[in-house]
Image (tube, grey):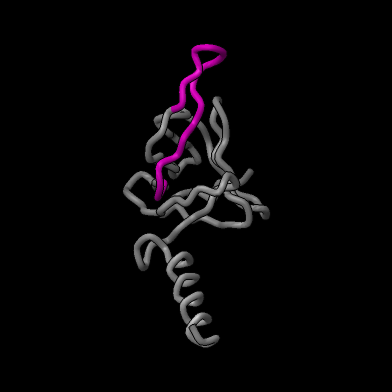
Amino acid sequence: MKGSTVKNLWSAIAISFAAPAFAGDLLYFSADGHQYRYSNNENGAVLQSVNPISRFKGQGAATEIVTGTETIYLGKSCDAYSEFFGSGTWGWANGGFIVDFQKGAVRFPRQEIDVPSGMHCRL
């Protein structure tokens, strides 16, 4: 292959990996490297993982790995919910926004999020 053909091939491959899952989607990226697709509803905002996520559940010998798409609900009154993590709160600061649960947290560094008709939830 000639140099320009190889260069064009690598450019096409790079663009295909950089493109969002669906054109026009608003995506957020967690500190753990997971992509979440944004949508909103009458209660606030919804973040749904683009790809399945694996999380550890339980302790010791009873630990199991739970894998599936993850949905995080961000409420207008700074409340949050996830089927895996349960209830929690969310807020933002200059460094990004965080969803805090009793069983863990999901962090979105250097990103801002808007929850329609909601409060400005601050950390």
User: Is residue 48 shown left or right of residue 55?
Assistant: left
For residue 86, say whether it is visible. Answer: no
Q: Residue at x 57, y 30 (%)?
A: 104
Q: Residue at x 46, y 35 (%)?
A: 54
Q: Nearer the viewer, residue 54 or 82?
A: 54
Q: Residue at x 40, y 50 (%)?
A: 50
Q: Nearer the viewer, residue 49 or 76?
A: 49
For residue 26, say whether it is visible. Answer: yes
Q: Residue furthest top?
A: 61
Q: Residue at x 55, y 15 (%)?
A: 59
Which image quadrant is residue 3 in? bottom right
Q: Is residue 54 magenta?
A: yes
The correct choice, above or below, for 18 with respect to 42 in the image is below
Q: Residue furthest right?
A: 94
Q: Position of residue 96 (x, y in %)?
A: 62, 52
Q: Nearer the viewer, residue 19 or 118?
A: 19
Q: Position of residue 105 (x, y in %)?
A: 57, 35
Q: Position of residue 83 (x, y in %)?
A: 39, 30
The correct choice, above or below, for 35 with respect to 78 in the image is below
Q: Quadrant of the C terminus?
A: top right
The range drawn in magenta is 49-65
Q: Nearer the viewer, residue 70 or 99?
A: 70
Q: Is residue 55 magenta?
A: yes
User: Is residue 1 shown left or right of residue 109?
Assistant: left
